[in-house]
Image (cartoon, coloured by chain):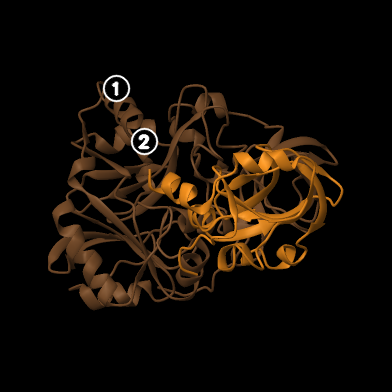
Chain colours: A orange, B brown
Amino acid sequence: MAESYPEDLKYHPEHDWARIEGDEATFGITWYAQDALGEVVFYDPPEVGATVSKDQAYTEVESVKAVSDVFAPLSGEITAVNDKLSDSPELINSDPYGDGWLVRVKLSDTDELESLLDVGAYKDLLSS
Amino acid sequence: MPVQYQGVRAEHVNVRAKAGMFDVSHMGEVRTSGPQAEELLQRLLSNDVSKLADDGAQYSVLCNEEGGVLDDLFTYRLADGAFLTVTNAANHERDHEWMAGHAGDFDATVENVAARYAMLAVQGPVARGAVECIADGVLPKRMRTATIPVAGEDTLVCGTGYTGEDGVELLMPPAHAPAVWDALLAQGVKPAGLGARDTLRLEACFHLYGNDLSLDRNPIEAGLGWICKLDTGFIGSQALQGVEPEQTLVPFVFTGPGIPRQGNLVNTPAGGGEVTSGTLSPCLETGAGLAYVPKGAAEPGTEIEVDVRGKPRAAVISERPLYPPKKKES
């Protein structure tokens, strides 16, 4: 897919996105992150029920060449993981904001939302 | 040389199915000439240089006195009687200093000629056909060399490679390399990067210096005893006499999920070991790598466990090569 950054998402400077729905959110990595990583060939989802902490690595994505940590844009508890990625990790490249989502999280502190970037600020970060 | 052009897997598969080219001009070259050039190289290189045929190619390691590996290299005996040794880029300066530093007792000249050569590796089942189309002459057979015009200028063509596929490596003046590259592109040969070079060599179970070879490992435990002719008296041969290493380098494949990486620890029925190269094998579509394991666990079929950042992953010791290319007589 072509480079894009949806307007309705919140962004973390480590190139992660969060789609907020009330006190829950879906996380994934941005177009920029998947492009920098190259073809994702392996993804082992974290456990449902695991706790994630804002700015901390909570899972890994692997290309042929390298392993990359994925950072949590917000804190909370994982309520669902994208099982499809075990068999089709390339969805992270082909549809990073859709079928390539990583986890769904019940947020523990919605005040953290204020620290995330909107699309304009994230694009500024990419071009700086 | 970039890590990738189109993607590691696509480039890898293209080399296995058709032909790819790698710009490996970063590799170094050392020229050894003079009446005692062969004697000097016999002292330095682990293989029997006297067996290196005219226009031949030979694989060897360069060892220190302790038998640690300084580098692994290909040496070509050129038509003018001189030798050209191709070094790994990261080791080139050290290799050249080592070789020149031991030349004093010999009537031989050791020159760093890295700046004189660009190097393109053209590899794959149809690689030779593509090079033939732009060459004026007969390509050398495997492990032989020939100097013939390629894209209009004299080029050293070597029947060698690092992928497990048929193909050649081309050494030419740097100014001529763009013309050769463009001519090969026009023949349908696709660029391949460092990523595919690594996955291809790993499937073929070729060593990578810095991963599978180092000063801390000797060539016997690395499985390179076959290129160590101890009776030639090369530097390091005394230290290697009678060496019975506790570990040996073996290929393995994962039987479940995960990708092994350099430095992962290994559990075997005979004790611990360590992964020195690991990747996702594009052809086997599973995690695969090379590891030093206790000799008692080196038999193909032995089940082992690799600790991938805290997760135990199931694996099995394999035969080499991990991926057998189709045999084609050249």
Image quadrant containing the C terminus of chain A: top left
Would you place residue B71 above or below residue A124 in this image? above
Q: For numbered disc 2, what is the local secondary structure?
A: helix
Q: Would you identify the image quadrant in which residue B181 lies?
A: bottom left
Please tell me whether residue B67 is drawn above or below residue B299 in the rendered image: above
- Residue B47: tell me if it is visible: no
Please identify, in this view, whether the residue under mark 1 or under mark 2 is nearer the observer. 1
In the rendered image, residue B189, in percent from the top left (x then y), is placed at 34, 72
Residue topped by disc 2: B42
Pointer 2 local density, CA inside 10 Å: few below 14, some 14–19, many at least 20: some
Q: Chain of mark 1?
A: B
Question: What's the residue at 44%, 34% (across, down)?
Answer: B232
Residue A77 vs residue A57, the one in the foreground: A77
Q: Residue at x 58, y 59 (%)?
A: B203
Whole-number angstrom distance, CA of label 1 to CA of label 2? 15 Å
Whether residue A49 is situated above or below residue B320 in the rendered picture: above
Residue corresponding to mark 1: B101
Give percent across and percent down for residue A78.
81, 50
The quadrant in which residue B274 appears is: top right
Q: Are marks 1 and 2 on the same chain?
A: yes
Q: From what the image shows, is residue B21 above or below residue B45?
A: below
Amino acid identity at mark 1: Gly
Circle 1/circle 2 CB separation < 8 Å: no
Whole-percent x and y of residue B249? 64, 43
